[in-house]
Amino acid sequence: MAQDGTCTLTIIGGVDKDGSLERVGRLEMRRGEVIGIVGPTGSGKSSLIADIEQFAAGDTPSGRKILIDGCEPRSETRSDPRKKLIAQLSQNMHFLADMTVGEFLRMHAKSRGRSPDLAERVIELANTLTGEPVHPDHHLTILSGGQSRALMVADIAVISDSPIVLIDEIENAGIKKREALDLLTGEGKIVVVVTHDPMLALMTSRRVVMKNGGMVRVIETSVDEEKVCEDLAKVDSWLMNLRETIRRGEVVGAAT
Amino acid sequence: MKLAVIAGTPGSGKTSVLIHAGRTLLRYGLRPAVVKIDCLWTEDDRRFERLGVPVAVGLAKDMCPDHYSIYNVDEMLEWARSQQADVLLNETAGLCLRCAPYPDSALAVCVIDVTTGPNAPLKVGPLLTTADVVVVTKGDMVSQAEREVFRERILEANPGCRIVEANGLTGKGAAELAELVRDGPEVGGDMRLRHNPPLAICTLCTGELRVSKRHHRGVLRHLDGFMEYSGE
């Protein structure tokens, strides 16, 4: 990832939905950092992610500017997937392309200037996240929401291996969210996660609070919050196990 | 005077993208005018009027809207000059994929919707393959991987084009498109089409309503590709 030397991502604040200046006027993110974006629905979380994804240059409704290493990015890094600095997992739960899984992944690898052989690795990885395995000959359009999301996550981890990763609500995917997040947050990346999930929010080092379209506050995760996160992880893995037991058609025992 | 011809299938978002681009052109200090060509009915002129730019509508009625637009280029440019415009944005009706109503000294813009699937760029034909700029809309409805595969397919069909990812709702991509229009070519005196329109003189063109080959004259192509001439 260091091949292009990317080490900081800066958001220069713009305006909220009423046109007032955002309270957070500047936000810098460094390599290796996982940052959360929280706030009620409609508060502008996805718009903030979209601004980062397209390297907004004061030309989006928010008026925000995105800087890479303190400078405005060149236009080819904005659009050419071979030079793209950003991998994004959006909220989309389905594929619309009428292609087989294998065909699609090989084509995607080609668009990113990577080897088509990576397709197999993507499918293998996707199948560690989902219950029903995905097969290369499956048509994309028949995949379930969970299978599609698992494939999108694995595709990002293997093919779109970019230094900046944007994740919009991984918890709604019906897949193993913790494993999925681990796959996406490779070493030395900048990861931005939009989430409503308390455990994911507390796993980040800082979180940006959104309100009325603007960034209103940045909260550092405290030591107390980290402890809460550890407890949540235990509850979460208990829930996951219960879910798997029920999915397998077995009977659930008493809590230990 | 600069001319940009904006083509693309119905519902692909031509008007929305163009309204955002028009706003940016105004910000650059240019004076755009819009001619919207449609078949039977349109209210896109009212959407453009809200921008505060001169708008004219051409309805092709029972003529092919692309042919109608092509032989009216002079009249459109004359009208735009009379409105003191320096950029003419000509939005076509967008029906037939075989017609590419792009003159040579104009910026040819093809708008295509990503939800039509990655085979669409291969199906579209000259409308896409002879365009200078391909604007991809509705990218927010699919995953990043799907957008990138779609882009790759466009480049297979038209390797030299410039791709702009746009969003008609948020205005994403409008500034990039406006810049390309601003830096586009000046219109020439004798403009020529980039690609020949399809052969379109048949019995149907002159009003025949009956189906089946026995009622039709002229050059006819069978389903298996065989061509015959029927008539005097």
Image (tube, rainbow, N blue to C red):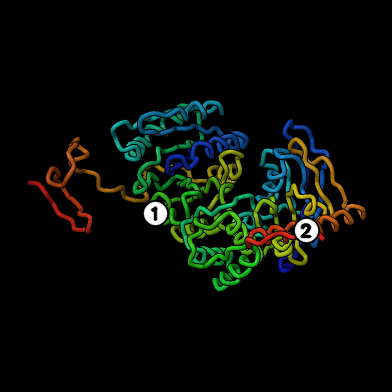
Residue B182 place in picture, x, y as percent = 55, 42
Which quarter of the rendered picture does the N terminus of chain A lie within? bottom right
Element type where label 2 sits in the image: loop
Element type where label 1 sits in the image = helix
Q: Give x and y (percent) for residue B81.
A: 46, 30
Position in image of residue B60 (x %, y %): 33, 32
Q: Evaluate whether label 1 is on the same chain as label 2.
A: no
Specify the amino acid type for callout 1. Answer: Lys
Amino acid carrying label 2: it is Ala
Res B27 quadrant in image = top right
Residue at position x 37%, y 32% in the image: B75
- Say the numbered circle drawn on residue B185: none
Position of residue B41 in the picture relative to residue B133 (left or right): left
Residue B125 to residue B216: above or below: below
Task: Tell me if residue A159 can be seen.
Answer: no
Q: In this image, B13 relative to A26: left or right?
A: left
Mark 2 belongs to which subunit? A
For residue B73, side relative to residue A3 (left or right): left
Q: Is residue B87 above or below residue A243?
A: above
Task: Say the numbered circle drawn on residue A254.
Answer: 2
Please rate how many residues cluster around mark 1, counting C-alpha atoms within 10 Å: few if below 14, some from 14 to 19, many from 20: few
Look at 19% across and 43% down and name the residue there: B202
Residue for point 61% across, 39% down = B170
Q: Nearer the viewer, residue A128 or A99?
A: A128
The residue identified by callout 1 is B123
Quadrant that contains the C terminus of chain A = bottom right
Q: CA distance from mark 1 to mark 2?
A: 59 Å
**Is A24 in front, or is A43?**
A43
Camera sees residue B119: yes
Q: Specify the subunit that label 1 lies on.
A: B
Crowdedness of circle 2 by 10 Å Cα count: few (<14), some, many (20+)?
Answer: few
